[in-house]
Amino acid sequence: MADGADTGRACVALIGGAGFVGTNLAARLAQDNAFRPHVYDTDPRKLAFRMGPDARCAFTPFDLGTDDALLDRAVAGADVVVNLAALVQPKRFLDRPLDMVELNLMGSLKVVEACRRHGKRLIHFSTSEVYGKTGGRDAPFTEDSTDCILGPIDNHRWIYSCAKQMLDRIIHAHGLEGGLHYTLIRPFNFVGALMDWLGPSAEQPRVFASFMNALVEERPLPLVDGGTARRCFTHVEDAVSAITTILAHPEETRNRIYNVGNPANEITIAGLAALMTDLFAEETGRPVPLRTQSVPGEAFYGAGYEDCDRRMPDISRISALGWRPQHDLGRTLRDAMRHALANYDALCGFRPAPATGAGAE
């Protein structure tokens, strides 16, 4: 065992682990006698907010773009490496497309190569976006059989998906040729405590935060292209439970891909707006009428925008490990909303770092 040997707990290096998903995962691992999390990221504020002063979790300042020697030491000293580093905001796909390649492909490739070099197990966060568009099919996305269909080059919104898919293929090749022990996780719309980009000064965030901002500020909820797209929202506690299940099954999950999502929680974005408005009224104790405004995708995000009409995961593979999501859609949204309302001022102060980022889907 690596540097977790003195405690009897496996050291888990969380690269880019101080964001939404990483912070929740670190908090869960810190309570598990089997694991000892060590977070490497640029900004510790969200982690400190979640963990408190008595956290059983180490933090080391780290920038994936520049700290190559530190990355090598972090991987060498870990038993398992979880790579969560990513830029994930849709508007950034359009405004800063080269950043999508620099971090999501080239930066994370350094993590992959360090794991191969030191013979370490890698759990890498891919994305449900690698599946691209449905192509008119209604079947759920399946890890090993669904084609990955992206839009034309001019719709550079797909550069994020393309960069992440390319890294998936490189990781797969390292498993074939170099013996890399890896697992790929494809998240489907995680929501919950400590989601990014809440607050009036935020860029166009992901949909839950966008709707929360609008409800708090008493603005119409923006429905991109009418809100007809369908998504499956997953409670972050269920997501973390899925990741710990994968951690606990190293051989069964070796060199495999896992969708992590909740297909029972599918809803249109227009339906989400109505449901969140109702829940917001219940949580705040004041009547809130449903107010929406349809906005063209390119007007909301920028030129080059295109989207997938539906993202539905097949979760039979991870279910075979004994994991099932426990939170229905109402509970998932209510818990996320309660946390956002109770901690709104603090959450508005957290901004993702421009270099590393630490998000996941």
Image: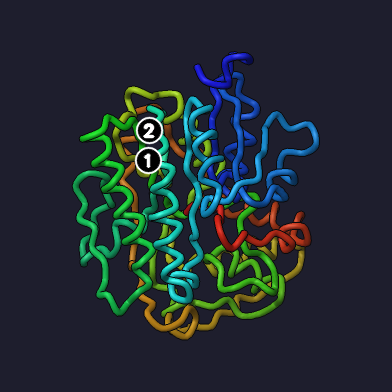
Dividing the picture into quadrants, the one containing residue 284 is bottom right
Q: Residue furthest right?
A: 53
Residue located 32% across and 29% down the image: 254
Residue located 26% across and 71% down the image: 151
Question: Disc 1 designates what residue?
Answer: 113
Q: Count of labels shown?
A: 2
Judge left or right: residue 130 versus residue 282: left
Residue 22: give x, y in percent of width and height. 57, 44
- Which amino acid does the dot numbered 1 rest on? Glu
Classify 10 Å Cα crowding around label 2: few (below 14), some (14-19), many (20 and above): some
Judge left or right: residue 201 versus residue 117: right
- Which amino acid does the dot numbered 2 rest on? Arg
Judge left or right: residue 111 versus residue 73: left
Q: Residue furthest front?
A: 69
Residue 246 appears in the rendering: yes
Residue 117 badge: 2
Query: Relative to 309, is 43 above or below?
Result: above
